[in-house]
Amino acid sequence: IPLYAGCSAMVPVVFAITTKGIPLGTSLAFLMAVAGLSLPEALMLKKVMSLRLLLLFFGIVAFGIIIVGYLFNLLGV
């Protein structure tokens, strides 16, 4: 998600969309994506990682976020 915001700034947004009926897994995945897949993080990591390693890192993080979101939705937590 190309949204630059701190994780703590997104907690009220996640709370609001969860109370409106969006499943908790989806909200949690959104919150984790804001924290873990940010453009500033990519720019900082680009200085110490090759492009291939950076893409692999973001791919693994995105895959993990998707899995966690689906699991929370399936468990109905």
Image: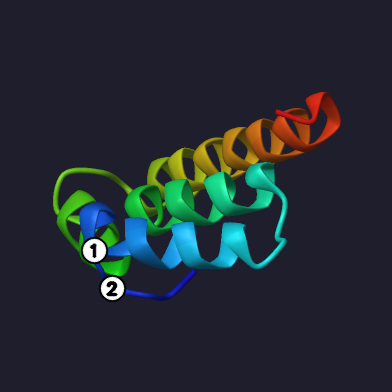
Image location of residue 32, percent across then percent down:
45, 46
Q: Residue at x 41, y 40 (%)?
A: 53
The image shows residue 2, relative to residue 34, as above or below, that is below
Outermost residue on the right side: it is: 74
Outermost residue on the bottom side: it is: 3
Q: Residue at x 22, y 49 (%)?
A: 45
The alpha-carbon separation of the residues under discs 2 and 1 comes to 10 Å
Taking 62 as reference, is 41 left or right? Answer: left
- Residue 4, disc: 2
Q: Quadrant of residue 46?
A: bottom left
Mark 2 secondary-structure assignment? loop
| Amino acid of disc 2 | Tyr
Mark 1 secondary-structure assignment? helix
The disc, 2 or 1, on the residue closer to the chain's N-terminal end is 2
Instruction: Estimate how packed mark 2 is, as few (under 14), some (14 to 19) or many (20 or more) residues with alpha carbons within 10 Å.
Output: few
| Amino acid of disc 1 | Ala
Q: Residue at x 64, y 44 (%)?
A: 24
